[in-house]
Image (cartoon, grey):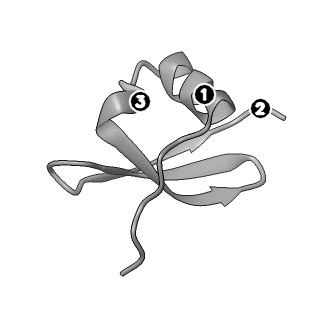
């Protein structure tokens, strides 16, 4: 499985828009229109929409 990466500033803003704490999430995929995230501690996964 691929490792997650630290989010960029724009990605952090997208996480805050859906009420997630960017300090707890890593980015696994950055697709046009959506962001795939994995939690640092629990390994739970989420997909959130991003504006662009």
What's the residue at 42%, 60% (across, down)? Answer: 4
- Residue 10: image location, x then y, percent: 68, 30
Residue plotted at (29% across, 36% down): 24
In the picture, the disc for residue 22 is: 3
**In the depicted structure, whether residue 50 falls above or below residue 28:** above
Q: Which percent across, then down, holds residue 45?
A: 34, 54
Within 10 Å of disc 2 (Cα), the crowding (few <14, some 14-19, many 20+) is: few
The one of 37 and 8 positioned closer to us in this rendering: 8
Disc 1 or 3, which lies upstream in sequence?
A: 1
Q: CA distance from mark 3 to mark 2?
A: 17 Å
Q: Which mark is residue 14?
A: 1
Please state if 39 lies on the left or on the right of 2 as rendered.
left
Query: Which tag, 2 or 1, sits closer to the chain's start?
Result: 1
Please give the residue where the numbered disc 2 appears in the rendered image.
Answer: 51
Q: CA distance from mark 1 to mark 3?
A: 9 Å
Q: Are marks 2 and 1 in contact (CB under 8 Å)?
A: yes
Nearer the observer, disc 1 or disc 3?
A: 3
- Judged from the image, the secondary structure of the residue bearing numbered disc 3 is helix
Residue at 47 percent of width and 46 percent of height? 6
Instruction: Look at discs 3 and 2 and give the one toward the viewer.
Output: 3
Tag 2 or tag 3, which sits nearer the N-term?
3
Considering depth in this image, is 46 or 39 the residue closer to the camera? 39
Rounded to the nearest whole Å, what is the CA distance between mark 2 and mark 1? 8 Å
Of helix, strand and loop, which one carries label 2?
loop
């Amino acid at each position: 499985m691929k490792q997650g990466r630290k989010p960029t500033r724009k990605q952090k803003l997208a996480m805050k828009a859906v009420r997630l704490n960017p300090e707890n999430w890593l980015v696994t995929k950055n697709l046009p229109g959506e962001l795939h995230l994995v939690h640092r501690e629990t390994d739970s996964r989420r997909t959130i929409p991003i504006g662009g």
